[in-house]
Image (cartoon, coloured by chain):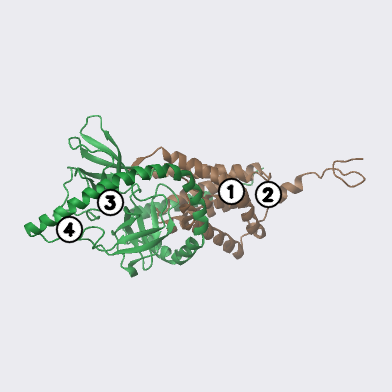
Chain colours: A brown, B green
Amino acid sequence: MIVAPMTFVRVGLLLILAVILQVSAVSQTSIFGGHADLVVLTVAAIAYYAGSVSGCAVGFAAGFLLDLASGATMGASSLVLTAIGYSVGRFRELRDPSHGLMPAPVGAAATAGWVLTFAAVSFMLDVGARVSPLVIRDMVVTVVLNTLIAIPWFVAIRRILRPSLSVDPVELGRRRQQPRSAGPIGLRGLEI
Amino acid sequence: MFDKKVVRRRRAALAVFVALSIAVLTAYFGESGGGFFHALQRGSQEAFAPVESGASRALKPVRDLFGWVGDTFDAKGDNEQLRAEVERLRSELARSQTAERDAAQLSGIVGLSRQDMYPRGTDPIAARVIARAPTVWYSSVKIDKGSGDGVKVDQPVIAAGGLVGRVTQVTGGTAEVRLITDASSAVTAQVMPEGASGVVRPQVGNPNDLLLDLIEGDRRVTEDTTVVTSGFTSTKVESLFPRGIPIGTVTKVDLDEFEQYQRVHIRPFANLRRFDIVQVLTRRPPNTQAAALPEGSAP
């Protein structure tokens, strides 16, 4: 990612928008007992397009903002989202995926990592109450909803971040593909 | 193959942000309610409040649309359940009205002054929910009324006729309400009309099933009875909740393996997953008779 003042403004506004949308709308919309989580999707998308260093920085900032806005224990969300951002960024750097449907499994894996790790951190910080098995249903619903909205959400974030990206993995993948040969009448695949 | 400088930079970045997160976490746990991070949280909540309030109002139609879809699925089951409940409540109402008339006459006879009970005498303030914590591990909501409207820390909050929580943080124009489904919540309560007392605790992840613990085995609790706050008072401590706020209905009673205590399952009156409007009870009604708590239970 190109480090410039406009990059900070873009990423900062994206994170604030995601946190406000999450706490004031998405968290209040219960679908089959659960709800989507835009904050982890935003962190995963930025890490996917910008890499591991940007991913962990954005994860920390998003967690900090989320804890400030929701009144939860400060530092817990930052810790987990830092790890999520770094992991997604490393995945992109090592595998270099460019398939158009890749955001769906990446979003699902990031969300599953977030809900499971956050639950583990909450247990370590002493929950102090019984935990219902329905927690697992809520986690599954969140992962499914995030998988469904991952592709449009990643596309939207890529468009916003594009001017600040030093390397766009999607464009890179497109350029790497060999153009299929065209026939004399100019139609690809019809070599006649 | 790998640039050592890049690898070192990457690892250093991860280490710095993890260390920062742990430092913030430790500092937050270590400081008092007036510490730096708590103050920062209050300040940012106040700063974000107008934006959150606007976003909450603007996106209400979208929330309602998704809520309508879910409600349609639940409506059929709820309809049958509510019809049965209306029948039961009709007979209970008739009994209560008779009992109230009798009680008024009796208190007049012994010269007792009639005291206001919930919700009378509590000066409720209506507020709108503008934000909600995004995980099940912290159950809290933010409302659009604060100290400027007379809201103070520890005041009880109700919605749709039932207790939902208490105020834990206040700024000028907003307040944070910790719900009774939060892992740290404990409310002293009493089953009516049996009078058995216990402590209502949540089950994380299931807001429709609260637990009333620490009820002695010899005081049998029956299903379909009502649970209200007990408003425990003693010379040293006092419950944060006034006596008589409805919490929910008993749905199931379990005995522990030694049958010393009963564990009572409660379905809360308020829909704790979805509510938009709440009332903050800003005044404590005059104290009524204190409820007896079993030994070892916290008020």
Q: Both on one chain, marks 2 and 4? A: no
Residue B265 at x, y percent in the picture: 31, 40
The answer to the question of whether label 3 and label 4 lie on touching residues, with beta carbons closer than 8 A, is: no
Q: Amino acid at mark 2?
A: Pro
Query: Is residue A17 visible to us here?
Result: yes
Front-lying residue, B90 or A185: B90
Judge whether A159 appears above or below A119 on screen.
Answer: below
Q: Both on one chain, marks 4 and 1? A: no
The residue beneath circle 2 is A169
Can you tell which of label 4 and label 1 is closer to the viewer? Answer: 4
- For the residues labelled 2 and 3, the Cα–Cα distance comes to 57 Å
What label does residue B246 carry, if any? Answer: 3
Residue B212 at x, y percent in the picture: 27, 42
Local crowd size for mark 1, using a 10 Å CA cut-off: few (<14), some (14–19), many (≥20): some
Q: Amino acid at mark 4?
A: Asn
The residue beneath circle 4 is B287
Chain under disc 3: B
- For the residues labelled 3 and 4, the Cα–Cα distance comes to 16 Å
Chain under disc 2: A
**Which of pointers 2 and 1 lies earlier in the amino acid sequence?**
1
Element at badge 3?
strand
The residue beneath circle 1 is A149
Element at badge 1?
helix
- For the residues labelled 2 and 1, the Cα–Cα distance comes to 20 Å
Q: Amino acid at mark 3?
A: Pro
Query: Is residue B19 visible to us here?
Result: no
Residue B176 at x, y percent in the picture: 37, 59
Can you tell which of label 2 and label 1 is closer to the viewer? Answer: 1
